[in-house]
Amino acid sequence: RGYAYASVRILETEASRADRINLTLRAESGPQTAIGPVTIVGNASVDENVIRRQLTFKEGDPYRAGRVTESQRRLYGLELFQFALVEPRLGEDRPVQVPVTVTVAEGKHRRLRLGVGYGSEENARATASWRHVNFLGGAKTATTDLKWSSLERGARIGLTEPYFLRAGGSLEFTASNWWTAEPTYDLRSYGGRVTFRNLLGSGSQSLADRFTRNELQTSYIREFEDYSISNEALADLSVRPRLIALGLDPRTGTGKGTLSAIELGFERNTSGRPLDPRTGYVASVHLERAGGVLGGSFQYSEVVLEGRRYFEFGQRAVLANRIRAGTLASADTLAADITKIPFFKRYFLGGSTSLRGWGRYEVSPLSGSGLPIGGRSMLEASSEVRVRISRKLSAVGFIDAGNVWTRDWQFHLDQLRYAVGPGLRYDTPIGPVRVDFGKQLNPIPGLLIDGKPEARTWRVHFSIGQAF
């Protein structure tokens, strides 16, 4: 803390016994030092102010080595530079005002990424992404994303202003035209949202805090939604009263309206590895309020809580745990006015990251004939052991539990559905390739899959990335 030339010397002296020596540690603090002039070299199109605002020190501050390291990490985080070096000039004359040179080499600011893939839920998919990380200067980021798959397709554009109001703050504008085809409904959504993100404690210098991310997010959403339920549900006469109650046309199974909502979220992440976490935890809260003074066609409140915890055992084994719960309620009184809750907000479980003994959206309350129609409360939990069996290959054993209930704030632990199974993971540069085999322990009586009674009580899932 302000002593750039501090040193520790070890002195050896003879002890009273021949088989021993005396060690003396002598610490010398040296003169107290401060940051001197800061010089920036190598920048061409990136404004010098963009670089200076990433530095966690300024001229005259007490010299701290941790702040020098953190400043260099922040410069790389901008994605503007292929090289960045923050170098204090600690000369032999030991000046008390330590000059600092920041050397950068700019990288390519425009990037195009094309991708193709396959998963057990999306089947074939293709993506294209274009990014400009210094759009109109000031390190603004402009993005264009395109996607096509059997589950979703569409286009999204965005513009992010970094360093909004404070270090760690950013303001993001997005507009999209997106189509989603879930097993129980189709949804076309177009509109936009404005999001303010705030990384809390972004100036902390401790080693532990460098692997901790605290993010507070606030969004305003304004989107037009056009949705319809599946043909199987439309043909089910027992569903007609529910269609009317949900605000859907019972003849066509369609609905539309404007979603105007405020979204609040907080996440604390200490795992440090988003693709393959091994230690730490993730805790998140999601709150959403639609309608009321915001206007729009829909009125509801949503609360979703999630926690994940990872335990590492030696170099080869990880125990991963997750629990997640959510509820949807009327925005006014938290009562049962479901006509203002759009169908696409209802909860379903099952799939490659949920109850793996079932397929996507197969676990929920059923219609009279056995079709999943979603609910307004859900609870799910998972625990799995991941054991490395070679440098690239890992084996997994898991148990999943969960269910969905019809009403808000309705949770019954004695009604949970369970699935167990093994899996394999193969490490790649983009994350582990994952294959899971899930077996139902207590199948859902009367469940229809593709209009027929469920014929098998197991599922195989193929995807990229850990389940959680």
Image (spheres, rainbow, N blue to C red):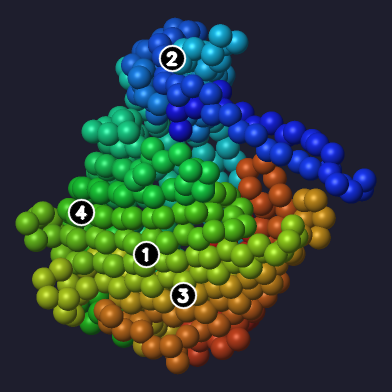
- The disc, 4 or 3, on the residue closer to the chain's N-terminal end is 4
Q: Distance between the residues labelled 3 and 1?
A: 22 Å
Closest to the camera, between mark 3 and mark 1, is 3
**Dot 2: within a 10 Å radius of its alpha carbon, few (fewer than 14), some, or many (20 or more) residues?**
many
Residue at 34% of width from left, 71% of height from top? Answer: 326
What's the amino acid at mark 3?
Glu
Q: For mark 2, what is the residue?
A: 97
Q: What element carries label 1?
A: strand
Q: Distance between the residues labelled 4 and 2?
A: 49 Å
Image quadrant of residue 180?
bottom left
- The disc, 1 or 4, on the residue closer to the chain's N-terminal end is 1
Residue at 69% of width from left, 31% of height from top? Answer: 9
From the viewer's perspective, tell me whether residue 336 is left or right of residue 122. Answer: left
- The reply to whether the C-beta atoms of the residues labelled 1 and 4 are less than 8 Å apart is no
**Measured from the top left, where is residue 82 in percent x and y?**
56, 20
From the viewer's perspective, tell me whether residue 378 is left or right of residue 272. Answer: left
Q: For mark 4, what is the residue?
A: 262
The answer to whether one can see residue 164 in this image is yes
- The reply to whether the C-beta atoms of the residues labelled 3 and 1 are less than 8 Å apart is no
Q: Is mark 2 on a helix, strand or loop?
A: strand
- The disc, 2 or 1, on the residue closer to the chain's N-terminal end is 2
From the viewer's perspective, tell me whether residue 425 is left or right of residue 152. Answer: right
Q: Which quadrant does the C terminus fall into? A: bottom right
Residue 380 is tagged as 3
What's the amino acid at mark 2?
Gln
Closest to the camera, between mark 3 and mark 2, is 2
**Measured from the top left, where is residue 94 in percent x and y?**
54, 13
- The disc, 3 or 2, on the residue closer to the chain's N-terminal end is 2
- The reply to whether the C-beta atoms of the residues labelled 2 and 1 are less than 8 Å apart is no
**Measured from the top left, where is residue 7 in percent x and y?**
61, 28
